[in-house]
Image (spheres, grey):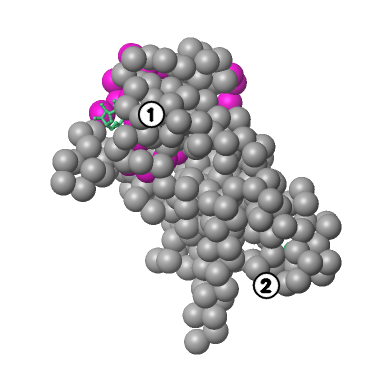
Amino acid sequence: MLERVDDGLVIRVTGGDVWVRIGPDLVVCSLRGRFRVKEKDLQVVAGDRVVVRRAPGSAALEKVHPRSSWLSRHADRERGSRLVVANVERLFVVASLGEPPPHPEFLNRVLAAAEWGHAPALVVLNKTDQGAPAEAAAFRAAYEAAGYTVMETSAVTGAGVDALAERVGSGVHVFVGESGVGKSSLVNRLDPDLGLVVGDVRERTGRGRHTTAYSQLFPFRDGYLADTPGMQTFRFPGDDPDEVAACFPEIARVEAACRFHPCSHTHEPGCAVKAEVDAGAIAASRYASYAEIVRDLRERAANKRW
Ligand code: GDP
Ligand code: ZN
């Protein structure tokens, strides 16, 4: 084979190896040469579209194409944000009734990170076979008020799974959620041939085990499904507290009516956002998450100055 240069899609990144789908081939590129030096800046991740140069016995990444959307999270160790998956067509943010119960702070940070990375998100409430309908309705109300579609599923009974499958078209479709909510179970329901490992929820803590260490794409119909690493925590990827409001659609919609500009929507008089929260039009749990992210970013900035 002569040397050739092709476009490809990154399926997964493990250690120093980047697995790239090029047509029918799966090519393993190692992060060497000039990419080795800048491995951390490069941050190549599943979903990235890349250019690969192949010669007999070797394959090297030449370039990562600009991303149309992405999901990333703050990582202290890297002093910045870490990509989870790139070029996201749709992000399914999964929560569950039963164990583990929904943690709005976690979900809201993921949803805000999705907005930050221009990734269209919707909310999936799984394990509906385990919870009371009233619980599901209360959950649904907060996210629908924010403008998100909420889908209810059970990976055990199969309820809602067809409707979920209808939302999967071409491109990369990502499942994100706390460990144990049923991401792998849902993906297996969509395509039983995938046979992803389903973790036992540990009895003592009620937390699922880490069953996946990295994001990985699986072909599904015209597109791809992506399983993401088990996450117990998730922190907003940005640095700028002023960017957070734009990542909460229901806050962004009303903030023009605040008396002060800019308004942080925390202590200022005449704040239209707080008025909406008081009136119940913006869910208190959503607003609390907004305020918590702003606080977190301010603390991070204060720590950096030292
Ligand atoms: P992941 O960590 O989010 O990938 O979650 P898993 O798919 O590994 O599922 C964690 C546990 O929840 C497993 O014991 C599953 O059998 C169970 N589980 C997943 N989906 C459902 C569901 O819809 N209903 C019930 N009752 N259990 C589920
Ligand atoms: Zn305000």
Q: Nearer the viewer, residue 207 or 277?
A: 277
Identified at 76% across, 58% down, the residue is 272
Q: Is residue 244 above or below residue 23?
A: below
Q: Amino acid at mark 1?
A: Ala
Q: Nearer the viewer, residue 38 or 130?
A: 130
Q: Where in the figure is residue 8, as x and y percent of width and height?
A: 54, 31
**Dot 2 lies on which element?**
loop
Q: Quadrant of residue 302?
A: bottom right
**Dot 1 lies on which element?**
loop
Identified at 32% across, 40% down, the residue is 100
Q: Nearer the viewer, residue 22 or 251?
A: 251
Identified at 47% across, 57% down, the residue is 235
Q: Where in the figure is residue 126, as x and y percent of width and height?
A: 40, 28
Q: Is residue 170 above or below residue 213?
A: above
Q: Where in the figure is residue 202, as x and y percent of width and height?
A: 18, 41
Q: Is residue 91 left or right of residue 161?
A: right
Whether the residue carrying mark 2 lies under 8 Å from ligand 2 is answered with no
Q: Nearer the viewer, residue 96 or 296?
A: 96
Label 2 or label 1, whichever lies nearer to me, is 1
Whether the residue carrying mark 1 lies under 8 Å from ligand 1 is answered with no
Q: To which residue does mark 1 refer?
A: 132
Q: Quadrant of residue 278?
A: bottom right
Q: Residue furthest left?
A: 204
Q: To which residue does mark 2 refer?
A: 267
Q: Do the numbered discs 2 and 1 sit on residues whose CB atoms are within 8 Å?
A: no
Q: Is residue 231 left or right of residue 41?
A: left
Q: Quadrant of residue 95?
A: top left
Q: What stretch of residues is rendered in magenta?
A: 169-198
Q: Is residue 281 above or below residue 267?
A: above
Q: Is residue 83 visible from the viewing direction of this image?
A: no
Q: Amino acid at mark 2?
A: His
Mark 1 is surrounded, within 10 Å at the Cα level, by few (under 14), some (14 to 19) or many (20 or more) other residues, namely few
